[in-house]
Image: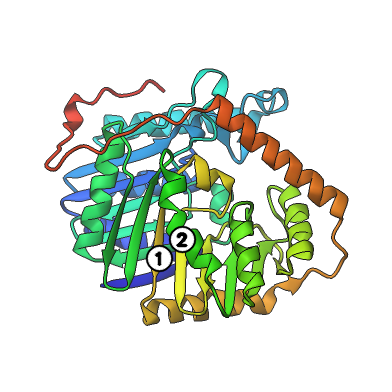
């Protein structure tokens, strides 16, 4: 098995572009956001140029209501020409892809009055032929390309096969909860239905840390903070790297309050938003993928999480991501605003309870062995 860490969009695109150019049998992509800007068009052009026999893209319905990190139906956005132009550009891009042989399908319906908005399919997957698979955090939109982020590239036929089954299940309209283990690597696929049960082992691993846990994420909330607090109680040093320019600013207040009451060290990544999703436990176990460490992951969202104990990959993460980012990230020096932090905590818990009532979890099934989806028989969704 070969595992490669690609940091930020330029390195990711350069490597993925090589993979798409050499693909002959399969070029499959799944993403949360796929927008008609330069980032989205880069992927569209690369897929159109690919000589792969089977080219497909799965896009979460999130893209139908969120463009450029903005809810398109708000009055101020309806009146914004740039937002309207991007929505039209996205529709044209998808129409062109379908007309030229790239199958595009949307997943995870939003429901009446967006009641299923919490239940997004948050996975990012790229599959090239039978031997290369990608997972991570990068979406195909300009604002996401500008953020700090990370992707994992695997060369391993077993991982590719597992993720191809996952992709096929989503394409067929089902879910793909599952777990697979290879040498020094476990992949966990969350379906948004059984997440709480599937995440028990991961949370126990966090609680059992003895020396250190370093979390690199913008959106750390309960129940992951609870597990980190337990680890701190066992004597582990807890460090959270989170962006100073968080696109969900109230979460910085929340984390400052949580750190003060739980004894975490919080360091602010400077200058730009960081969308990176990783955790290093006891300097020996790397957890990374599409998942944030928040209540949405724990309850609602379909995700892919890799737990890697291969020393070479852990060392690669440490030298390419963790050490450089720690070096430029500054500890929070101001006293945490407990009122704002507690207010954020109460608001998040109210939202989570409301989401539980309004967004029922729907059972999903993985298609059985040998399932084949006939692309030609798949109805195109109207744009």
Q: Which of marks 1 and 2 is in front?
A: 2
**Front one among 13 and 220:** 220
**Disc sitting over residue 359 in the figure:** none
Measured along the vertical axis of the image, is residue 367 above or below residue 257? above
Which residue is situated farthest in the left direction here?
370
Reading the chain from its start, which is encountered first: label 1 or label 2?
Answer: 2
Q: Name the residue under label 2.
A: 202
Residue 184 visible in image: yes
Measured along the vertical axis of the image, is residue 153 above or below residue 317? above
Left or right relative to 187: residue 120: right
Badge 1 vs badge 2, beta-carbon distance below 8 Å: yes
Q: Where is residue 55 in the image (x, y as percent from the top left)?
A: 24, 43
**Front one among 121 and 377:** 121
* Label total for image: 2
Q: State the residue at coordinates (52%, 73%).
A: 281
The image quarter in which residue 329 lies: bottom right
At label 2, counting other C-alpha atoms closer than 10 Å, the crowd grade (few under 14, some 14-19, many 20 or more) is: some
CA gap between label 1 and label 2 equals: 9 Å
């Amino acid at each position: 098995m070969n595992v490669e860490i690609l940091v930020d969009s330029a390195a990711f695109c350069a490597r993925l572009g090589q993979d798409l150019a050499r693909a002959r049998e399969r070029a499959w992509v799944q993403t949360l956001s796929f927008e008609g800007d330069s980032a989205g068009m880069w992927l569209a052009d690369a897929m159109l140029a690919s000589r792969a026999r089977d080219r497909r893209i799965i896009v979460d319905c999130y893209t139908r209501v969120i463009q450029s990190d903005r809810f398109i139906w708000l009055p101020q956005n309806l009146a914004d020409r740039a937002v309207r132009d991007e929505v039209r550009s996205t529709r044209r891009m998808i129409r062109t892809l379908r007309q030229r042989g790239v199958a595009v399908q949307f997943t995870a319906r939003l429901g009446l009055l967006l009641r299923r908005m919490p239940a997004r399919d948050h996975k990012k997957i790229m599959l090239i032929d039978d031997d290369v698979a990608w997972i991570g955090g990068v979406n195909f939109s300009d604002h996401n390309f500008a953020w700090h982020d990370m992707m994992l590239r695997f060369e391993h036929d077993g991982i590719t096969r597992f993720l191809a089954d996952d992709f096929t299940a989503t394409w067929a309209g089902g879910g793909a909860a599952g777990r697979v283990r290879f040498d020094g690597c476990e992949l966990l696929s969350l379906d948004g239905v059984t997440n709480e049960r599937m995440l028990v082992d991961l949370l126990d691993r966090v609680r059992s840390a003895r020396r250190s846990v370093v979390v690199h994420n913008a959106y750390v909330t309960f129940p992951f903070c609870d597990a980190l607090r337990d680890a701190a109680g066992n004597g582990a040093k807890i460090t959270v790297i989170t962006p100073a320019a968080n696109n969900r600013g109230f979460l910085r207040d929340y984390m400052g309050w949580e750190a003060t009451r739980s004894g975490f060290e919080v360091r602010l990544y400077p200058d730009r938003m960081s969308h990176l999703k990783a955790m290093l436990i006891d300097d020996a176990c790397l957890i990374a993928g599409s998942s944030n460490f928040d209540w949405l992951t724990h309850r609602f969202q379909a995700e892919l999480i890799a737990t890697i104990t291969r020393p070479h990959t852990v060392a690669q993460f440490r030298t390419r991501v963790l050490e450089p980012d720690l070096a430029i990230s500054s500890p929070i020096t101001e006293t945490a605003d407990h009122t704002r932090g507690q207010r954020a905590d109460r608001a998040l818990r109210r939202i989570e309870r409301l989401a539980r009532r309004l967004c029922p979890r729907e059972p999903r099934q993985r298609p059985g062995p040998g399932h084949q989806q006939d692309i030609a028989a798949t109805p195109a969704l109207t744009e």
